[in-house]
Image (tube, rainbow, N blue to C red):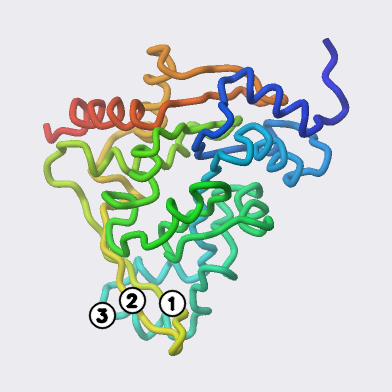
Amino acid sequence: MTPPASWTAEDLATDLASLGIDRGGVVMVHASLRAIGPTEGGAAGVIAALDRSVGPDGTLLMVLGAHGEWAWVNELPENERLAQLVAAIPFDAWHTSSDPDVGTLAEVFRRHPGTVVSDHPEGRFAARGRMATELTSNVPWNDYFGPGSPLERLVRAGGQVLRLGADPDTVTLLHYAEYVADVPDKRRVRRYRWVARPQGPEIRTVDSLDDSKGIVDHPGEDYFSLILEAYVAAGRARVGTVGAARSELIDAADLVQFGAAWMEAHLRPE
């Protein structure tokens, strides 16, 4: 069958239903628009398909991060960071654009009417639907991917992770598994951010496990990719095609359990 010149939202919603997305579900999305292929309405058309797939009682969640031209400051010694940051544009939860690394869809999702966002310069999420506010409000400032985070809330809500042609190292939920895993000497970081506040911008520090270079040194391929590959190979994901994108639908709680066990087995000091 020859694929159409462009997918409609209805086409994609049909594919999503075949993959196993249920109406009323809570779904965290990672997607590559390029992998999905041309879609009527572009990124907005993909969002329309996702909205249709979970229905009015469902919820969609995406990680945003924040575009930060000043992230390099946190590579400096701590005593040099403050003087550099005061020249930066303060982070604003509603107006700062998404981290470009998370893709175009996340930024369109952030701006889409009805989407709400969490107020955090590092672990910023966006959600839309019935549980959107519950997932994104009052999140922890430190350890923002750990207990009490939108990631843990996704798991507790019986949520799923939907991957639409996304790179294998982009499973944000595995950062929560890093907190769950019993791994010794996990690496931590402290970052400084210039943050907008009603009374004016202020410098704030953020302490967390190292979600940039990993919680321990690991040779070779990114261990998030290895975990995802092992998980799919074990037959624990639903695999199919959405548009032109090879896609996976994953139970969030199961992936955290699998990922934590993998880390405990492989991220040990020699």
Indicate the quadrant where residue 155 lies.
top left
Residue found 28% across the figure and 56% down from its top: 143
Q: Amino acid at mark 1?
A: Val
Where is mark 3, residue-wise?
79
Residue found 25% across the figure and 42% down from its top: 217
117 is higher (above) or lower (below) than 96: above
Q: Report crowding for label 2: few under 14, some 14 to 19, many 20 or more residues within 10 A (C-alpha).
A: few
CA gap between label 3 and label 1 equals 18 Å
Task: Choose the circle earlier in sequence order: 3 or 2.
Answer: 3
Q: Please, which residue is most extreme toward the right here?
A: 5
104 is higher (above) or lower (below) than 72: above
Q: Is residue 211 left or right of residue 171?
A: left
**Quadrant location, the C terminus:** top left
Q: Please, which residue is most extreme toward the bottom here?
A: 199
Residue found 83% across the figure and 38% down from its top: 40
Labels 2 and 1 touching (C-beta < 8 A): yes
Residue found 60% across the figure and 30% down from its top: 165
| SS type, badge 1 | strand
The disc at residue 195 is: 1
Residue 146 position within the rendered picture, expressed as x and y whole percent measured from the top left: 28, 49
CA gap between label 2 and label 1 equals 7 Å
Task: Choose the circle earlier in sequence order: 3 or 1.
Answer: 3
Where is mark 2, residue-wise?
204
200 is higher (above) or lower (below) than 167: below
